């Protein structure tokens, strides 16, 4: 077992510990830390890609926390980097939040505050807490020092307030090229926290912004913009993932130096890590751009758009986020828990249909050639309210190829020469003859049926150990079924690598009722799993179904 596997959370241990964030909020309410102000949170994504399942955890935490305390939650786009952001991502994020079942109080952008942020920067300069630096990005890194060695002060650190005010105004006016100058906070180059060693708070970027166009050519850095955005919006509790813990002193410094009353409180929680899943926007973007997947909404992708197209429900994702809870310790959750949640959600919501993914023809030689019967079959084992449906049955059928073995292994109770099985909701059939092509491949089974054994007839004769599903060949509907494996798998070193076999496309045969399916409809394919009519590709002429999840669960409570 790899070290990485050993670190994985044992999902059989229910995470029912108290929510430490809510404990903090409870104390703040008791102490009236924020007076009579309501609890106010925000979800602040950068619009530089599509959201993934890790963001779903943050969305649920921020919105449900506000709901619990009768407060509010903003959706705020951290659009401080015009080189990477796009309105396509803005719209996709809004759709994802709504789909998960949440509605924001205000829709805001960091760019809404650019003028106020510049005013705050001038205030810091006037207080001697910020200066314009001419060092290049590489030189700034060299001057910063290491974890064990202090940094060196920039030769431009002691410019006068008047000079810094003038130079920063010239940066704003577009006098300098990208990288020629930056504005840095003046803190402590010997701080044990590298983030406090005179961090850059403004840089020049001669780029068109998706929201403000060409109005600005200087843009704030995230660590400077983030606390100001929270303060402007009167956020009480700024919930961030754990990698921002080392940035909290800078968050507090910005607001302290600006004399902010009742500043927001940053609280960090562990981000979601999931087995067989990569949650790096950069890597996911590479998968899209290099054609390894169909797009951001490819059903193999961990994006919320991908999960939605895959057939996951918002209820299942919210249930998953609630089960994993919040923690201060980074860990990895087994993806089987997410799969368990979607099975639990769908089992009483969807009807069952018979679909043969890998068809093998069966001819019932003693069945009348001109006869078609209607078999009554239950629509769901889990929900009686769905009732029954009638399924046509005649002389020629399709069964699953893996329901037949010419030379059966031990405890194989399905079709093999001389064996008898029950066809679901129909009759017993017995395999008598195996037909092969010139290359020795099995292409047809010839069987006989016992007309006394029809389901529901009260037959109490001999018993059979195997029951298999089937599709009537005469009335079958052809489907294109996409069966998925994990997009990422572990290599011999325990590292996640791209799975070359993550997609298998099959031409399947289905009972005729599936001809009436509409894009987005979900079903359980009997004995196979849960499937959705692809919301993007499905048409009457191109019946594409995506596997949501198989029926077998490895997760145990």
Image (spheres, rainbow, N blue to C red):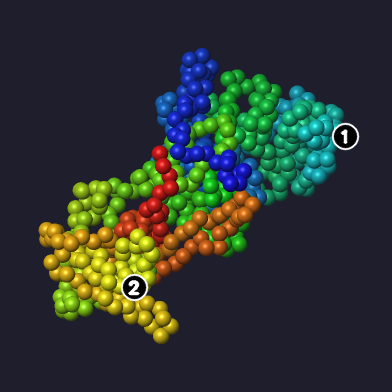
Q: Is residue 277 left or right of residue 438?
A: right
Number of marks drawn? 2
Q: Which residue is mark 2?
A: 360
Give the residue furthest to the right. 155
Quarter in which the C terminus is drawn: top left
Of labels 2 and 1, earlier in sequence is 1
Q: Position of residue 123 (x, y in %)?
A: 71, 27
Q: Residue at x 61, y 62 (%)?
A: 290
Q: Is residue 550 above or below residue 478?
A: above
537, 222: nearer the viewer: 537
Residue 452 or 68: which is nearer the viewer?
Answer: 452
Residue 250 at x, y percent in the picture? 68, 29
Residue 418, image quadrant = bottom left
**Please, is residue 400 above or below residue 250 in the view?**
below
Q: Position of residue 318 (x, y in %)?
A: 42, 40
**Can the viewer see residue 228 in this picture?**
no
Label pair 2/1, CB-CB below 8 angstroms: no
Separation (CA) of disc 2 from disc 1: 79 Å
Q: Residue at 30% x, 68% y: name it.
A: 415
- Please indicate, yes or no, whether residue 161 appears anywhere in the rendered image: yes
Residue nearest the viewer, comparing 19 with 500: 500
Give the residue drawn at x 85%, y 29%.
Answer: 158
Q: Nearer the viewer, mark 2 or mark 1?
A: 2
Expressed as whole percent of the image width and height from the top left, the position of residue 491 reads: 61, 55
Q: Looking at this rendering, what residue extends furthest in the top direction?
A: 31
Give the residue at mark 1: 155
For numbered disc 2, what is the local secondary structure? strand
Instruction: Assign a secondary structure to mark 1.
Output: loop
């Amino acid at each position: 077992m790899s070290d990485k596997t050993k670190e994985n959370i044992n999902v059989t241990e229910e995470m029912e510990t108290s929510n430490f964030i809510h404990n903090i909020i409870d104390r703040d309410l008791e102490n009236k830390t924020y007076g009579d102000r309501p609890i106010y949170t925000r979800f602040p994504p950068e619009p530089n890609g599509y959201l993934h399942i890790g963001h779903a955890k943050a969305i649920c935490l921020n919105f449900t926390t506000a709901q619990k305390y009768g407060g509010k939650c903003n959706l705020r786009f951290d659009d401080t980097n015009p080189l990477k952001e796009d309105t396509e991502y803005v719209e996709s994020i809004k759709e994802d939040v709504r789909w998960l079942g949440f509605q924001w109080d205000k829709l805001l952008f960091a760019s809404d505050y650019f003028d106020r942020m510049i005013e705050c920067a001038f205030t810091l300069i006037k207080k001697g807490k910020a200066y314009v630096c001419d060092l290049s990005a590489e030189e700034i890194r060299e001057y910063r020092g290491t974890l064990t060695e202090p940094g060196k002060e920039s030769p431009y650190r002691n410019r006068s307030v008047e000079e810094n005010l003038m130079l920063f105004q010239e940066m704003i006016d577009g006098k300098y090229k990208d990288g020629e100058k930056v504005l840095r906070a003046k803190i402590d180059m010997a701080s044990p926290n590298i983030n406090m060693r005179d961090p850059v708070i403004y840089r020049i970027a001669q780029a068109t912004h998706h929201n403000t166009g060409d109005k600005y050519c200087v843009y704030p850095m995230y660590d400077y913009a983030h606390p100001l955005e929270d303060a402007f919006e009167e956020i009480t509790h700024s919930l961030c993932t754990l990698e921002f813990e080392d940035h909290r002193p800078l968050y507090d410094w910005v607001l302290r130096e600006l004399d902010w009353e009742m500043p927001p409180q940053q609280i960090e929680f562990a981000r979601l890590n999931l087995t067989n899943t990569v949650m790096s926007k950069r890597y996911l973007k590479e998968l899209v751009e290099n054609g390894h997947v169909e797009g951001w909404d490819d059903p193999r992708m961990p994006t919320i758009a991908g999960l939605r197209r895959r057939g996951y429900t918002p209820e299942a994702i919210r249930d998953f986020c609630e089960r994993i809870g919040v923690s201060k310790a980074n860990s990895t959750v087994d993806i089987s828990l997410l799969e368990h949640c979607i099975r639990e959600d769908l089992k009483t919501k969807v009807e069952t249909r018979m679909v043969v993914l890998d068809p093998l023809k069966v001819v019932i030689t003693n069945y009348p050639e001109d006869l078609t019967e209607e078999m009554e079959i239950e629509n769901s084992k889990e929900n009686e309210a769905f009732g029954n449906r009638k399924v046509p049955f005649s002389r020629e059928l399709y069964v699953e190829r893996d329901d037949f073995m010419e030379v059966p292994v031990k405890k194989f109770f399905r079709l093999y020469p001389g064996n008898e099985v029950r066809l679901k909701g129909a009759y017993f059939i017995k395999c008598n003859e195996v037909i092969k092509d010139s290359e020795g491949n099995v292409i047809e089974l010839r069987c006989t049926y016992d007309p006394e054994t029809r389901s529901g007839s009260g037959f109490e004769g001999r018993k059979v150990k195997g029951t298999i599903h089937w599709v009537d060949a005469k009335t079958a509907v052809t489907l294109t079924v996409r069966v998925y494996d994990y997009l990422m798998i572990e290599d011999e070193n325990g590292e996640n690598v791209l799975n070359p076999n993550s997609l298998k496309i099959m031409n399947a045969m289905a009972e005729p009722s599936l001809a009436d399916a509409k894009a987005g409809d979900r079903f359980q394919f009997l004995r196979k799993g849960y499937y959705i009519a692809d919301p993007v590709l499905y048409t009457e002429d191109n019946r594409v179904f995506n596997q949501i999840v198989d029926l077998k669960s490895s997760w145990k409570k």
